[in-house]
Amino acid sequence: MIYKFKKITFFYLFFIFYFFVFSNFSLYDNSYSAQIDSVRMGFYNAVQDSKKAEALLKQIKVIKPKSALVMVYDGATCAVMAKNVWNPFSAVKLLKKSNEEMNRAVKLSPTNLEIRFIRFAVQKNIPSYLGLSNNLNEDKKYLIKHIDSFYNPKLSKEMRDYILWFMTDQGGYTEKQIELIKEKLQG
């Protein structure tokens, strides 16, 4: 199917999820912490088994008000669902909804690195010819500019290594930027 993601797309999303859930890397408002943790766990389950994505979308739908962080997970979950849709028009519709939700999330919380990183990772793995990866350069620049904010002493070495790998191997950064990323994330 022409709309299939790269094989390792959901491997990336799994580690993104793992990074934010198990690293104690708190980037969200405490009033939403229980809901966000539940959404993150649901997202982890959906990445492992995309059939669980629909249940997660139902869970997200009842969260009121919907924070920007919940919106980005809503969008990312739609992208997970698109992977297994047999109808290409339905898959594109889900990917468009995914893109809209993630863009709304960034608009509401433009400085949230978790939101930017999730949108970047999802869009990086959507086929470019669909025209739904228009924010890659913007997010790429934002992430490199704020790379210092990714360092957290509670963050495991494995997660720093994963982010380092994703950004240097999959991110499309220049050699100079890669050196900066390595310096900041290995520190």
Image (cartoon, rainbow, N blue to C red):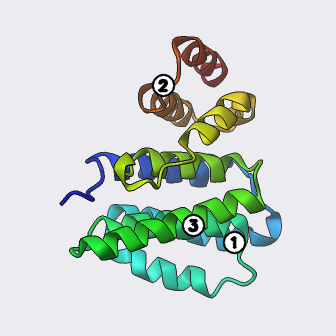
Question: Above or below — where is 71 with respect to 60?
Answer: above
Question: Which residue does the image show at 60% across and 22% down from the upper left?
Answer: 181
Task: Say which of 172 and 56 sits in front.
Answer: 172
Question: Which residue does the image show at 59% across and 35% down from the upper left?
Answer: 140
From the image, tell me which residue sits under label 2.
168
The mark tally for this picture is 3
Question: Above or below — where is 130 with respect to 70?
Answer: above
Q: Is residue 55 left or right of residue 174?
A: left
- Residue furthest to the left: 1
Q: Is residue 147 left or right of residue 123?
A: right
Mark 3 residue element: helix
Task: Say which of 85 and 50 sits in front.
Answer: 85
Q: Are marks 3 and 1 in contact (CB under 8 Å)?
A: no
Q: CA distance from mark 2 to mark 1?
A: 32 Å
From the image, tell me which residue sits under label 1.
34
Q: Where in the figure is residue 76, as x and y percent of width and height?
A: 49, 62
Q: Is residue 58 visible?
A: yes
Task: Say which of 181 and 133 sits in front.
Answer: 133
Task: Say which of 148 and 155 sits in front.
Answer: 148
Badge 2 amino acid = Thr
Badge 2 density bin: few <14, some 14–19, many ≥20, Cα 10 Å: some
**Circle nearer the N terminus (3, 2):** 3
Q: Is residue 40 visible?
A: no
Q: CA distance from mark 3 to mark 2?
A: 27 Å
From the image, tell me which residue sits under label 3.
100
Quadrant housing residue 33: bottom right
